[in-house]
Amino acid sequence: MKKKIALLISLILISAFIASCGASTSPMDAKNGASYSMNEAYDNPAEAPMAEDDFYFDDGAVYNAAKGSSSLITKTSNTDFAEKMIYSASATVETTDFEKSVEAVYELVESYGGFLESSYITGQRLRSQWENYAPTRTASFTIRVPADSFTSVKSALSGVGNVVDVRDWAENITAQYYDTQSRLDTYRLEQERVMAMMEKAETVSDMLELESRLSDIRYQIESLESTLRNWQRQVDYSTVNLTVEEVQRLTVVEPEKRSYWQRVGDGFMQSIEDIGYNLSEFFIDFVAAIPVLVILAVLILAAVVIIRIFIKRSRAKKMRKFAEQQAAPVNKDSV
């Protein structure tokens, strides 16, 4: 009986010992189970162990490892954001008072709180002025004005001169802008996570690999930030490309309706003006060419004198030869 009781107690103790071994692990096993390779954490961030405040990416959203919710960034429709529009215009203005129009451009830009991105003023060579090429002078401006003043600036161009051409267009970059912003936010979160992993890296190879990835992430962040800044500047300040041309007569942009005889009269007066204009230009060209004409006249006169002297000497030579032949004695034997 005692042997049976001892055997029963032994079986109970052995069972308890086995159960306790199955419920616990060795320190080395615990360490191996809790550790993970750097490559697995980098390639599969959602599977890496995280603290309560760590986040991971899944299907375009950022999830909290502890709370299991997308508490930071999710893909959102672009309709939830303000539209990003880039407005631009191109205009041509004529003027008969070039200096005044150029000054008016500077005043216009200042009054609307804009700035000149670039300007270029060109004159005309002296030869072109003699030949009456038009326009005599031209000014080109690239103007940046606040977007809310874009329409007002276009209307105010009539104060610079005679507006003959205005073209404007708009570009909607809303989708590109917010897609780029979303990519930037994702890279920033990845940067924070890689920096946190660098603090836990145990080997040099892991540290070097993380530093390489961090360098790539920072390059992408700087590139995306530069793109967003450039877009935002274009959204905030619209562009107006303005050309100011100096002319002698302004173009009639919207001519009034004329009757048949009025059109005949206009044509007749236009012909008279053209004749007077051409005569005045001919007189200018003639006066400008006087030095050349004088030199040409002297050369022609010299050539005529030289030719006449040559002809005169040739005739005199022939006359002397003929007189000598007449004065020579006649040979009787030959007769």
Image (spheres, rainbow, N blue to C red):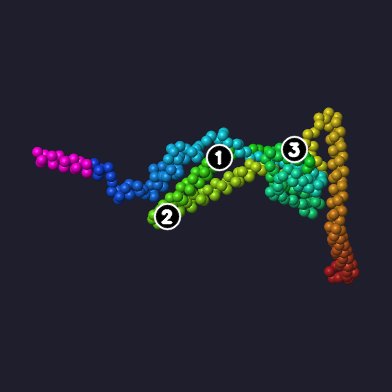
- Residue 95: x and y in percent read 80, 44
Tag 1: amino acid: Tyr
Residue 9 covered by magenta stretch: yes
The residue under the point 72% across, 47% down is 140
Pointers 2 and 1 in contact (C-beta within 8 Å): no
- Number of labelled discs? 3
**Residue tagged by mark 2?**
207
The residue under the point 76% across, 47% down is 106
Label 2 SS? helix
Label 1, residues with CA under 10 Å away: few <14, some 14-19, many ≥20: many
Residue 212 covered by magenta stretch: no
The residue under the point 19% across, 42% down is 13
Judge left or right: residue 202 versus residue 17. right
Mark found first going from the N terminus, 2 or 1:
1
Tag 3: amino acid: Ser
Overall secondary structure of the magenta section: helix
Q: Nearer the viewer, mark 2 or mark 1?
A: 2
Mark found first going from the N terminus, 3 or 2:
3
Judge left or right: residue 173 versus residue 26. right
Label 1 SS? helix
Range drawn in magenta:
1-17
Instruction: Establish if 35 lies above or below 85.
Output: below
- Residue 286: x and y in percent read 86, 52
Q: Estimate the spatial distance between the alpha carbons at disc 3 and disc 1, rounded to whole Å.
A: 32 Å
The residue under the point 40% across, 47% down is 41
Mark found first going from the N terminus, 3 or 1:
3
Tag 2: amino acid: Met
Considering every residue shown, the one lying at the far top of the view is 259
Res 178 label: 1
Label 3 SS? helix
Q: Estimate the spatial distance between the alpha carbons at disc 3 and disc 2, rounded to whole Å.
A: 61 Å
Q: Could you tell me which quadrant the N terminus lies in?
A: top left
